[in-house]
Image: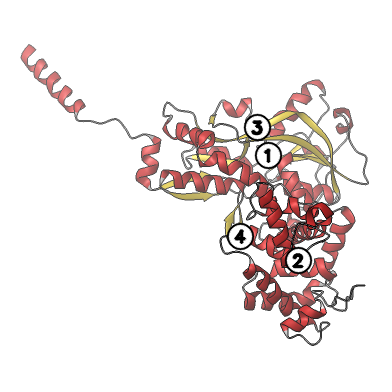
Amino acid sequence: MRLVIAILLLDACLFLSTCSEPPSLLDTVIERGTLRVVTRNSPTTYYLGNDGPTGPEYELARAFADSIGVELEIYTPETFDEVIPELLNYRADIAAAGLTITDTRSEQLRFTRPYQDISQHVIYRIGTPRPRTIEDLLDKRIAIVAGSSHAETLRRYKQQFPNLAWSEVPATQGDELMYWVAQRHIDVTVVDSNEFEISGRYHPELRIAMTLGQSDQLAWGLRRSEDHSLYRLATRFFEQGRGAQLVASIREKYYENRTRLDYVGTKRFLHHVEGRLPEFRGIFQAAGIQNDIDWQLLAAVGYQESHWDPAAVSPTGVRGIMMLTKATAAQLGIRDRLDLQSSIFGGARYLVRMKKKIPERIIDPDRTWMALAAYNVGFGHLEDARILTQRFGKNPDRWNDVREQLPLLAQSKYHSTLKHGYARGWEPVIYVNNIRSYRELLEWHFSSRKRDLNLLLAEEIPPETAGRSTSAAGKEFF
């Protein structure tokens, strides 16, 4: 009997020795060949732009997947409050959705090293009473994104102010709720500072009423488990890898140097988008196709030049919807600068001409911004500014470095040392910033990201829902 047991034990040991441990999460990702990332559809995370997928979280996730040597599989659930369940239910490997690190979330998730600090802003509409304290919110209609960290913040305040009430809406992003505030369907909402920094430009009626609590931190989330393989690699990515370099460039690309148009200017622009642009849109699109230029960029140039007025004439003699000079029109073979089609197609060709002059090593978007600056101030002055940039030890192939030096062209001690002399160098900086803002407004206006909110706003928020969360389908809210 003892011999039989000994043989069975030996067989069991031999069997166990041939069984390997289950693969780690990192091994699984590599074997699968794809990294599954759940995110959300918003300008601060991931969206489809003119040139395909883009957004801060997308760029980071793309670079991380490349560093592992796998394909990126990124997707968005219908609402923000579904992001974390997608991760916990093993459908995603990482949640890269602009997640704020909170105590509640930290019980479920393991967060990587934070990559951005943000604040929670209370947003209201100008022309309505500005809430300056929590007490001022007690009689307000408040709505926030379901599943967001804003609910945790409000619950903490509710302990001190029991009458504080709000509704949680199953939405993908705070931009929808900002729209509701702008349309007076609710009084206030709470959004993260980075989201307002981008989307607030599309809602000129809105302002920051106050900031709640201290600053928060954004990070990627992974499931809590004994397997730390993917977590360690993601953390290293932000600490010392490509991610650490990308964070700074993403901040610059998506947030910085974006002039927020004032209320009157933005409202006027959106009014002209509806009233004037339809007449010219087909020509802008045709000129864009013929010259391989984004038609919305071309239309933004036209608006900056003339507010889409085909008969515009400046005191200096430039005229037409693209405000071509007489010399430029002659170079382009244009006889009548006030002819709508000639002006738009001519402006497109001139912009292409400027872009071709930019050294080939300079890639987009810097190449486009420099071409626009040259369209405004002249290629020679742009080159002078690039020389100044190099003198100051900065990168002459980088628009954000060049734009810092352009205003110096108006100062004698600088332009006297340069070939093309004096220029009102601050003008091309404002010019490019405005065009970037107009183009983004056009993208937002025509984008699939702009939901048909009329369906969602079929009725006002029922007062009895205040302070309660809605179902995933949003039936209780609407």
Number of marks: 4
In-front residue for pair 79/174: 174
Q: Nearer the viewer, mark 4 or mark 1?
A: 4
Q: Which of the marked residues, 2 or 4, is nearer the chain's N terminus?
A: 2
Q: Where is residue 72 drawn, in percent x and y?
A: 47, 49
Q: Which of the marked residues, 2 or 1, is nearer the chain's N terminus?
A: 1
Amino acid identity at mark 3: Gln
Amino acid identity at mark 1: Ala
Label 3 and label 1: CA atoms lie apart by 19 Å
Which residue is denoted by mark 2 in the rendering?
300
Which residue is denoted by mark 3 in the rendering?
217
Asked whether disc 2 touches disc 1, contact meaning CB atoms under 8 Å apart, the reply is no
Which residue is denoted by mark 1 in the rendering?
146
Q: Where is residue 125 drawn, in percent x and y?
A: 87, 46
Q: Which of the marked residues, 3 or 2, is nearer the chain's N terminus?
A: 3
Q: Residues within 10 Å of mark 3 (few under 14, many from 20)?
A: some
The outermost residue toward the bottom is 335
Amino acid identity at mark 4: Asp
Q: Nearer the viewer, mark 3 or mark 4?
A: 4
Amino acid identity at mark 2: Ala
Classify residue 126 as left or right of residue 111. Answer: right
Q: Where is residue 189 drawn, in percent x and y?
A: 79, 40
Asked whether disc 2 touches disc 4, contact meaning CB atoms under 8 Å apart, the reply is no
* Local SS, label 4: loop
In the picture, the disc for residue 364 is: 4
Q: Which of the marked residues, 3 or 4, is nearer the chain's N terminus?
A: 3
Q: Where is residue 335 drawn, in percent x and y?
A: 79, 87
Label 2 and label 1: CA atoms lie apart by 36 Å
